[in-house]
Each structure stands twice: as structure tokens, then as C-alpha cells.
Amino acid sequence: MNNCKTCVHWRVDKSESWNEYLFPTDPDTFLPMEMPFEVRICEHPKKLFCERPVERDGFSLQDGSGYWATIYTAEGFGCVLHDPYPDNQPPQED
């Protein structure tokens, strides 16, 4: 199965440096931690929030309050909605 690491919808926003899921910090030193794999946010256009999926292959997210929810995935997560990069490799980041 194709995985998130090669999907165009698997994104990270560097401006969200406060986000401990995306950018974990050491609780003792507050320095960025080196992790064995990357985690990003799925921004697939079929993702819905707090409503029933309207397509057979759609999906929806809801937290307990109905206020906010995000799907975080690791690079090896498999997805049937995978949309690969043209060469199956993500662009190089700065």
C-alpha cells in the first residue's frame, strides 16, 4: 500500500513550530528532539470535519467537543486515497 511519505497531501507548516505533535521538544532542555520518523498533517481534500462523509471513499474527523480535530499521520501510514508526487518523491525542503 502507498504511504503518507510520498503523498502530495501530507504537509507540515513550519509556522506551527508550537505544535508538539509536529515539532517535539525535550521537556528538560526545550530543544528540538530528533525523532526516528516524521509526523505531518493529512490535508487530503476529501477530509471533512464534524459531518458525515458524502463520498464512498471520504472520511471525517470529530473531536469530543465538535470544535477542532486534526489527523496526524506518520510517514509509513498507508492510505487508499494516496496521491503520489510525480516521481513518488516529496520535494526537498529548505
Image (spheres, rainbow, N blue to C red):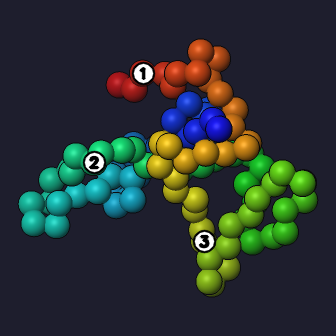
Q: Which of marks 3 and 1 is in front?
A: 1
- State how far apart marks 2 and 1 are (Cα): 19 Å
- Category of crowding for the residue at label 1, using alpha-carbon neighbours closer than 10 angstroms: few (below 14), some (14–19), many (at least 20): few
Q: Residue at x 62, y 83 (%)?
A: 64
Q: Which amino acid does label 2 sit on?
A: Met
Badge 1 marks a residue whose secondary structure is loop
Q: Quadrant of the C terminus?
A: top left
Q: Place residue 65 in its image quadrant.
A: bottom right
| First of labels 2, 1 by sequence position | 2
92 and 84: which one is in front? 84
**Residue labelled with disc 3:** 68
Relative image position of residue 54 (x, y in whole percent)? 90, 59
Q: Place residue 7 in its image quadrant.
A: top right
| Residue 87 in the figure: left or right of residue 58 | left
Q: Are marks 2 and 3 in contact (CB under 8 Å)?
A: no
Q: What residue type is labelled 3?
A: Trp
- State how far apart marks 2 and 3 are (Cα): 26 Å
Relative image position of residue 43 (x, y in whole percent)? 63, 47
**Residue labelled with disc 2:** 35
1 and 27: which one is in front? 1
